[in-house]
Amino acid sequence: MPLIAPSILSADFANLERDIRLAEEAGADWIHVDVMDGHFVPNLTLGPPVIRRIREITRLPLDVHLMISNAEAMFQHYREAGADILTVHQEACVHLQRTLAAIRQSGAKAGVALNPSTQPETLQYVIEDLDLVLVMSVNPGYGGQKFLSSATQKIVRLKEMFSGRSVWIEVDGGIQEDTGRLCIQAGAEVLVAGSYVYHSSDPVKAIHNLKQLVHPASVV
């Protein structure tokens, strides 16, 4: 089964603790936290103080996606607030290898996000420094966007690049049952779902539906 990481970007911020606990009780594996700075992407979300409070109310790993400029100078604040996985953008990180090494040195897992137009081969020289690659299947900045089908071929190419290595492939953007199945079939292991979970009439069922998606080769 894939790992499911509900994105709290689509949660009710007035009832954030309730929505996080709902995801936890429904069997979510991680909590995905989208951090946006209004500069690298055209939106503002939340910062370390909120992540610190989230850390106090859940034991699930906090999967923190830094959609920010100058992540190499800022990631430590999010690590200290409680992030377990820190993902920076290839497009926003000038000294990518150094940043990934520093994230790992801090004790967190290190990830790189790829925008829809960024090719997987740009990661060829940092493979040894990676724990995770986040394939953006929408352009980052807002929730509720339509899934870009080109993401599946990118997943296939990453899977080939990482042959024999332990690197999670995560997908974020427009994930629901049909698109999630395509991603799993292509080789993804982690699905981020925001609107599909938190805008559903039954968020628990939505998480259960995603957790039941399996690669056809796994079906006997």
Image (cartoon, rainbow, N blue to C red):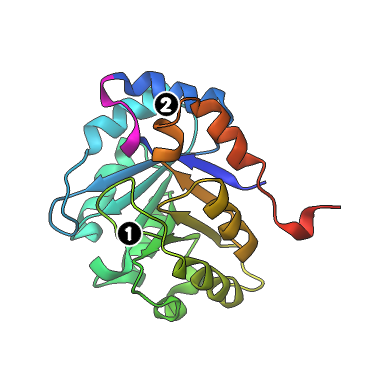
Badge nearest the viewer, 1 or 2: 2
Residue receiving disc 2: 20
Q: Quadrant of residue 53?
A: top left
Q: Secondary structure under badge 2?
A: helix
Q: Which residues are magenta?
A: 9-14
Q: CA distance from mark 1 to mark 2?
A: 23 Å
Q: Residue at x 56, y 62 (%)?
A: 167
Residue 56 in the image: above or below residue 76: above
Left or right of residue 165, residue 200 in this image:
left
Residue 17 % position (x, y):
36, 20
Does residue 93 show up magenta in the picture? no
Residue 162 % position (x, y):
58, 72
Q: Secondary structure under badge 1?
A: strand
Q: Earlier in the sequence, mark 1 or mark 2?
A: 2
- Kindly report the secondary structure that dominates the magenta region of the rendered protein: helix
Residue receiving disc 1: 88
Q: Residue at x 16, y 44 (%)?
A: 44
Q: Residue at x 48, y 22 (%)?
A: 22
Q: What's the residue type where badge 2 is placed?
A: Ile
- Between residue 129 and residue 41, name the one nearer to us: 41
Tally of numbered tags: 2
Left or right of residue 206, residue 115 in this image:
left
